[in-house]
Every structure is written in C-alpha cells, then in structure tokens.
Image (tube, rainbow, N blue to C red):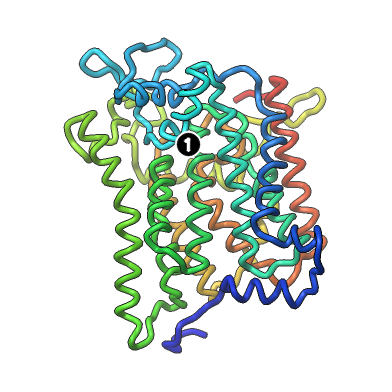
Amino acid sequence: MQGTGEPLHPWPTPAEVAARLDRSALGSGWRALWASSYWSTVTVTAVTLAIYLFTASREATALDYFTRLADAFLHGQLFLTDHPSWLSELIPHDGVCYVPYPPMPAVLLMPFVAVFGTGFPQQDASCLFGAAGVGLAWLMLGRFGLSTPVRALLTATFGLGTDLWYITVTGTAWYISHATAVMFAVAAVILALDRRWPWLCGLLLGLATLARLPVGLGAPFYLALLLGLGWPPRLPRGAWEGAIRTTIAFAAGLAVPMAFYAVYNLARWGTPVDLGYTSIPGVLKEPYYQQGILSIAYIPRHLYAIFLRSWNFVDHPPWLQPSWWGLSLFLTTPLFAWLIRARRSDPLTAWAAIGIALTLVPIITHGNIGFTQFGYRFALDFQPLLFVVLARVFAGGISRAAVVAAAASIAINAYAVWAIATGFVAF
C-alpha cells in the first residue's frame, strides 16, 4: 500500500458499511432498527446520559464560571460584574472580571441559563455534552466494520472506562470544557472518516478548539482523512485540484471559530493573540509555573503522570485511594495497552499518531499536569484519535484478555467515581 501513488481508503466508506450490514443478514423489525445508526446512536446517548446524571452530584457546582459567563452573554456582555472569592481564576480588568477560558461551553449553556437561570447545575449540561460524545463515538466506531459486541464494548469503554466519566459528571469549569471538546471532536472525526463536508468537519474541529485549545493542533489528522492520504503521504496525479478544494474548505470551516476567538480576545484585551492565562491573579507565582506557563522542563512531570502515577495506598479498606494528582493513563484505562499492537504502516494509525503528537505539544510543556483530577484528563483532548487506533486494532476481532481489560477499565472508573463522591480521595 505504501508509495503506490493510488488513492488509499484504509477505512470503510458509508456505502461499504451499508453493504456489510446487508450481507450480515441483520433481518428486519427491531434488529434492523437497531442496525440503523440513528436509533442506536440515540439509544447509546440516552443510556449514557442516564448513567451520568445518576452518578453526578445534585448540588450545583461552585466553580460555575461558564454558567455565569453564559448569563453575561445573554445580557450582551463579555464580562462578569461580580467576583466571588471562590472563583479565584477570574481576571479583574477595568472594574469587571473576565473568564480566561475559551468560551464554547458558555455558548452552549446559554439556552439552559435562559430557561432555568443561573442556578442551573452546570454539571447537568456537562452530562448531556459528554453523553452526546459517547453516542457519537458509537457512530464513529460503526465506520470500522467492527462486530456489534466489539463496537459496543469499545463504546462503553470510551464513555465509562476512561476519565471522561468522572470529568463529565463533575462538570466544573475545566471539566465541562473537556466534555464539550470531545463531543465536537468525535463529530469531526466521523465526517473525516466519511470524507464528507470538509467545511463542516473544519467547523466542528474549530468548535472543539473553542473548548480546549490543544485539540485544534490535531488538524493534520482530520485533513489527511478528508484527502484520503496514505502513508507516506502522496496524492495521485490529477487529484491535486480536488485536494486543494478540500483543504480550502476544511481551513475555512476551522477559521470561523478561530476568527471568533480572535475577536473575542481583541474585545477583552485589545489584542487577538492574548489568551489571558498569564493575567490570572498570582498564576505565575504558583510553584508549578516556575519556568512560565509553557516550558520543556515540564515534560518529565507529564510523562510521569501519563505512565507511572499510581493510586494512594492507605491502611484501611478499600485501600486504593484516588489521588488528585491523577492516575496513569494505562492504570485508568488498561485497554489502552492494546494501542501498542497498532500497525505503524497503517495510514490511519500513522496520521492519528501525528495528530496525537501535535496535540500533546502544548499539553506536556504546560506547568500544570491537570490536577485536581482522576486519571490524566488532558488525554481527553486526543481520546477520539486513541479510539480510532483501537478500532483498527480490533477490526479483526478481540481477545479475551482485551475484553477483560475493557471490563477492568469500566470497573476502575466506576470505583473512582464512587470513591471520590464519598470523599475517599486525597493528594
């Protein structure tokens, strides 16, 4: 497949997926209805939402930056007029306060705040966004010709076997941003896999970036899929004109949210390139930012968090205590160990690796490793790409060991949600 100059399609097209469904003699009635992507996606989303809401706190989160910002937007303002002492990362400026984070969650919260007011529990919206992301993950995994049990197992792991569960049901300022970004990023992956509507794919990726800025750095992965690039990357003769049109459409869609963010920053700080983070009161005096917000000196602490960070061990039941510092990605989700079985020559895997690596650049050079958290929450910025690779790994079937690892992933995250809810957590 490498270097042939022919267009490569290492993932099934929608027509091929439909043909596979036809050939598998799915039958009629409810079984055929379940095979319909729309109804099964709604079902997965509804079930996940029920689990998320059941395990979420009924008390509105105190870190409701985005609920307050949504209310400000509804009143035609970009700023907050009050500054509660517990919202310590608000940025005072000319007698008002600004929320430093990218504003996409606040935009999505506007209808909820308009109807229910500022007392609306921010985590409920987070549960909805997270559940929508899991439903879309089910839809995404349907592009790989997986058997229904394997597809269901991977979807369950995506939603309940990663720290997406804890992050979503907590729904504080940083966490709802992750849930929002995952939802939009998975939607963008689906369009990229289908090689459809590159402008919309770019727009969705841009909206994900307006929730979590590092997500946008994975753009080469999405564009490579839209172009059908193989590995090493090469376009056949006569394909350049179409590739240019696709690239322009994708870039135009991505540029719309980015232009909005530039104008948003211009209105706040008088410059489109200031993100506001260094203006958070006292942030540069924090011990974990001794080298500034970003520095290569921070890479070892992130590598330790990703690969080696473990539980707190205590002398009384249930012994394993979640640490607010996090937990290794592979202890949080043991199924990720199967990523090592991905074929490096597979174009989809290669482009996913590039997208993940680029997304990691501002993450692992950032002074904060993500605490407070369960797991390594920054991995959510590229989680859709990780599951694309896992789908390729398990396209030919799944071993019993992998099934056990997936079940363990779900059990670990369920335990963490319970332990933290009961106060059994510490640094």
Q: Closest to the observer: 7 or 75?
A: 75
Q: How many marks?
A: 1
Q: Is residue 321 left or right of residue 68?
A: right
Under circle 1, the secondary element is helix
**Residue 285 in which image quadrant:** top left
Against 257, residue 284 (above or below) is above
Q: Residue at x 62, y 17 (%)?
A: 59
Position of 348 relative to 272 (above/below): below
Residue at image point 42% right, 63% down: 197
- The image shows residue 60 at horizontal and vertical percentages of 57, 18
Q: In percent of the image, x 61 and y 68: which residue is there? A: 342
Q: Is residue 28 left or right of residue 134?
A: right
**Kind of residue sitting beneath label 1:** Ser
Q: Measured from the top left, where is residue 325 in percent x and y? A: 56, 32
The image shows residue 228, relative to residue 292, as above or below, that is below
Furthest toward the front, the residue is 29
10 Å crowding of disc 1: few (<14), some (14-19), many (20+): many
- 410 or 41, which lies in front? 41
**Would residue 194 be found to the left or right of residue 331 on screen?**
left
> Residue 354 appears in which quarter of the rendering?
bottom left
Which residue occupies the extreme left position in the image?
270
| Quadrant hosting residue 49 | top right
Q: Point out residue 206 in the picture as x, y percentages from the top left corner.
A: 38, 49
Q: In which quadrant is the C terminus drawn?
A: top right
Residue in the image at 46% along x and 77% along y: 231
- Identify residue for label 1: 177
Image coords of residue 83 (percent x, y): 37, 12
